[in-house]
Image (cartoon, rainbow, N blue to C red):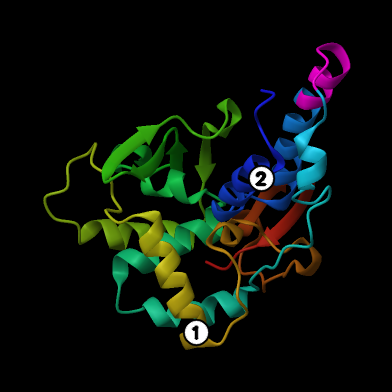
Amino acid sequence: MNEIKASDIRAWQNALMKKGYSETYLKTVNNQLSAIFNYAVRYYDLKDNPCRKAGSIGKSHAGEKEFWTKQEFKQFLVTVENKPETKMAFLLLYWTGMRIGELLAITYNDIDLEKRTISVNKSYQRIEGRDIITPPKTPKSKRIITIPPFLTEELKEYISHLYGIMADERMFRFTKSYMEHEIIRGIKASGVKRIRLHDIRYPNLNKIQTFQKKDVNRNKYRLKRFGFYFWCMIPL
């Protein structure tokens, strides 16, 4: 531990920042490492804390997130209209709040069109060329999502064109990097504001849109995001 220099810490910090972690996560991890060195300085006579020399990374508070309005999302969807699999993936990300890894792990077994539900119970990653299925990010991430009627119909139509797929086989056979490429391409083509792939799953809490009612009893969906409850009117 006494051989670790400030230059080593900087190299570690740079490697973390290249992975695309959030600013708050970077700050937390950096602080934890610094705390370990502080403990060694105080109780084990380590000469100094190299993290102090290296400087901090990240932010204590997350900046305001960028979101797509419904209209911006519709503009973006036009750019993937000729790619049914890609379009369906983006529709599910936007309307269900699933993480990209959760979406890519979905199998036909996880979908109940009768009950209009999707069971989220695993996550997918491509690591060193291998397909890896893991549990979701946290235990609480295991959940059953109820989807609105219009999205159920889109999903039913999409599934009807899948031939030879096994019930336990992944429905979306591409990777996160493909989706990241598609969102960048679609943003350039549509002219909508740039957001991260991860941010598609967050509703815009500052500009909640109320859509024209056709049937109040059927169209109301109570959503919970970040401790806020609101009513979102979704068209049939």
Q: Is residue 127 visible?
A: yes
Residue at the spot 52% in from the left edge and 78% down from the top edge:
74
Report whether 34 appears left or right of 169. right
The residue that mark 2 highlights is: 7
Report whether 229 appears left or right of 218. right
Residue at the spot 77% in from the left edge and 53% down from the top edge:
230
Going by the numbered disc 2, the residue's amino acid type is Ser
User: Which of the 4 image quadrants contains residue 53?
Assistant: top right
Specify the principal SS of the magenta part.
helix
In primary-sequence order, the first of circles 1 and 2 is: 2
Q: Provide the residue span drawn in magenta.
A: 37-46
Residue at the spot 36% in from the left edge and 78% down from the top edge:
81
Q: Nearer the viewer, residue 131 or 166?
A: 131
Magenta segment includes 41: yes
Dot 1 crowding, Cα within 10 Å, few <14, some 14–19, many 20+: some
The answer to whether 144 is drawn above or below residue 2 in the figure is: below
Horizontal and vertical percent position of residue 149: 48, 58
Q: Which structural element holds mark 1?
A: helix
Q: Which mark is residue 188?
A: 1
The answer to whether 23 is drawn above or below residue 141 in the figure is: below
Going by the numbered disc 1, the residue's amino acid type is Lys
Magenta segment includes 166: no
Q: Which structural element holds mark 2?
A: helix
The answer to whether 132 is drawn above or below residue 199 in the figure is: above
Disc 1 to disc 2, C-alpha distance: 38 Å
The answer to whether 194 is drawn above or below residue 7 in the figure is: below
